[in-house]
Image (spheres, grey):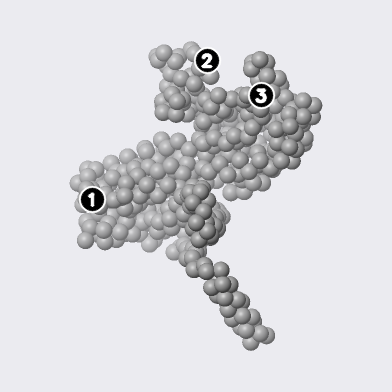
Amino acid sequence: MAIRSLASRRTLAGLKETSSRLLGLRSIQTFTLPDLPYDYSALEPAISGEIMQIHHQKHHQAYVTNYNNALEQLDQAVNKGDASAVVKLQSAIKFNGGGHVNHSIFWKNLAPVKEGGGEPPKGALGGAIDTHFGSLKVLVKKMSAEGAALQGSGWVWLGLDKELKKLVVDTTANQDPLVTKGGSLVPLVGIDVWEHAYYLQYKNVRPEYLKNVWKVINWKYASEVYEKECK
Amino acid sequence: YPLDALEPHMSKQTLEFHWGKHHRAYVDNLKKQVLGSELEGKPLEHIIQNTYNNGDLLPPFNNAAQAWNHEFFWESMKPGGGGKPSGELLALLERDFTSYEKFYDEFNAAAATQFGAGWAWLAYADNKLKVVKTPNAVNPLVLGSFPLLTIDVWEHAYYLDFQNRRPDYIKTFMNNLVSWEAVSSRLEAAKAASS
């Protein structure tokens, strides 16, 4: 049985390669849902296990699936030289690719308390926050206020402007990545304020979600990104 | 209708939050925002057009438009709703969409593909029916057409009952909640206003 299934896998792979060559298509890089570095319930009580599971397995997965579909369609359109099809695909790519990019960062922005979630940033990033905002408390207040005031769906970000060498707080709409607000912006911490990120637990009270999410923000990861970009 | 009247298709819990918290907040916040301004005391539709400002939205727009949109949404539904429309409305749908099924599919697709927060609409303009989708608080009033039917596709509208399954929510709305009577009477009003 095992030998048969090995053989059929090789045959299928061979067929795929052959058809790719016949059609003159190079194969495109597709994406998969990244695993979370912690259990779904590990961020409780700040974010419920129910939300984490649906957020990861349903929402993020859908962005990955739809992004891959859009990329395949884009590949075909590019190969055919169909310019208007290429342009038409841009919004699907921005929505779904952005969704994949943003959520991949988000899962790393969070950590269980026992793994350092909520611990204030030290080192270079801690210093930079004090310099640019006065204190972590002021930064948190600013980000929470901007996140609460965002109309509709989007994200609130702490970013590093590589060119101007300063920290910035900004928001993006829908699944626009931070880089759409400025080519030199590097995301350090992003907080998802789409209703799906908090509704089952906090209902309409987004400010309460924003108050509690800081307890599981992984400043260690943000510091690593900051230090890497500052070299 | 009472908050539990749309069960099991839309839960009492959803109505308690959606009407009792979200819609109420839009109304309360709008009142605070226009207090002492030239918009105070003006009709809601006037405030909406004024603050839409040709797309360069002024601060009260979101609350004003969302207050209007939600009232329109509650009135677009009824207990025991859904099914197919009849009479003139059905005739016009068949004329402008080829068949009711084509309209149903187009409306569902619009509601399913409005990315992020927003609304899908059946609207009337230039003696034609059309399906429109809008982001966040935008509605057909500011786009120059008469709204006839809407479905709220902000996640808060369906998350407690359907979580991420927006297509199931849309189907349930169309099959079990739409008040075709409301849509028909709005069509009559729209035709009268256009003539």
The residue beneath circle 3 is: B127
Residue neighbourhood size for the residue with mark 1, other residues' Cα within 10 Å, grouped as few (<14), some (14–19), many (≥20): few
Q: Tag 3 or tag 2, which sits nearer the N-term?
A: 2
Q: Position of residue A222 (x, y in %)?
A: 32, 56
Q: Quadrant of the N terminus of chain B?
A: top right
Three-letter code for the amino acid on which mark 2 is drawn? Pro
Closer to the camera, B72 or A87? A87
Disc 3 secondary structure class: loop
Is B125 located above or below residue B168 in the figure? above
Residue A163 disc label = 1
Between the C-alphas of marks 2 and 3, the distance is 26 Å
Q: Position of residue B190 (x, y in %)?
A: 65, 20
* Tag 2 residue: B43
| Label 1 with label 2: CB-CB less than 8 Å | no
Q: CA distance from mark 3 to mark 1?
A: 54 Å
A27 to B58, vertically: above or below: below
Give the numbered dot on residue B188: none
Amino acid bearing label 1: Glu
Horizontal arrangement in the rendering, residue B185 relative to residue A58 (left or right): right
